[in-house]
Amino acid sequence: MKSLSAEQYFLPDFKIFDSDKSNDFAVWQPDAVYVILGRGSHAKNALITENIIADCVKVLKRPSGGESVVLSSEMLIISVKKTLIEGERIQSIFEPVNIKIIEALHELGVENLSIRGISDICIGNKKILGSSAYRQPDKIFYHAVLNVSQNIEIFERYLKHPAREPEYRAGRSHKNFVTSLQAEKYTFGSLELEEILKTKLSHFCAV
């Protein structure tokens, strides 16, 4: 059997980390399916490697923490770089950006939204967005995955149950824990949501 190796994270959003702007953002859709390992994750513990190899899915390792995730063209990736104020903790990025995302979803009629765990956004008690962050002394980088319409079975196929989980997950499998906007009967398009998010984040990054 072929072995599985992870490449360094190279996807478009990380380019903003080294951009000339003090504050910057990106909202985009992946061009394929990717499996992303968190900084402290190892493929043998986090991934169902035989399925990933069989499906020829590329595995990348990001510099930010958190558990492993799947990306696909049925999701939106939301990334923000902010100048770090002296003494500011890495957790400070999660809430203000997640609030902007919730505001954008509210504009499109999405209800029953909340921030759960450290940085998840949920509809009811099911997760639609997870995020992670990476910092250097002078800047912080946040990126999140919002599930617009991806079938939940893909998580069951590629990801093992995570070694760490928020309390509200309560041991639930991926299929019982994660949902999508489409599964919750919201039918607006990704492009409509993307434009609203860009407006919200441009104001956020201008502050």
Image: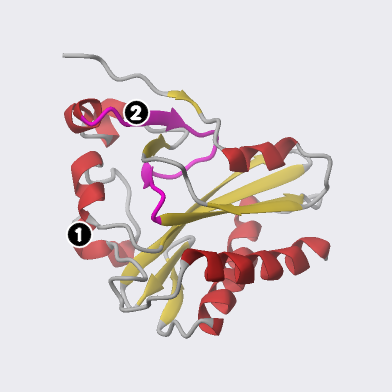
Image spot of residue 64 (x, y percent): 54, 39
For the residue labelled by badge 2, is the local secondary structure a helix, a strand or a loop?
loop
- Work out whether residue 60 or residue 98 is closer to the camera in this orientation and state it: 60
Q: Is residue 30 above or below residue 93?
A: above
Residue found 50% across the figure and 34% down from its top = 62
Residue at the disc numbered 1: 175
Would you identify the image quadrant in which residue 44 lies?
top left
Q: Is residue 193 above or below residue 172?
A: below
Q: State which tag comes first along the sequence, 1 or 2.
A: 2
Image spot of residue 22 (x, y percent): 83, 48
Assess disc 2: are there few (<14), some (14-19) or many (≥20) residues with their C-alpha within 10 Å of its C-alpha.
Answer: some
Image spot of residue 66 (x, y percent): 44, 45
Label annotation for residue 42:
2
Q: Is residue 121 left or right of residue 153?
A: right
For the residue labelled by badge 1, is the local secondary structure a helix, a strand or a loop?
helix
Label annotation for residue 198:
none
Q: Is residue 140 left or right of residue 133?
A: right
- Work out whether residue 181 or residue 168 is closer to the camera in this orientation and state it: 181
Q: Which residues are magenta?
A: 55-74
Q: CA distance from mark 1 to mark 2?
A: 22 Å
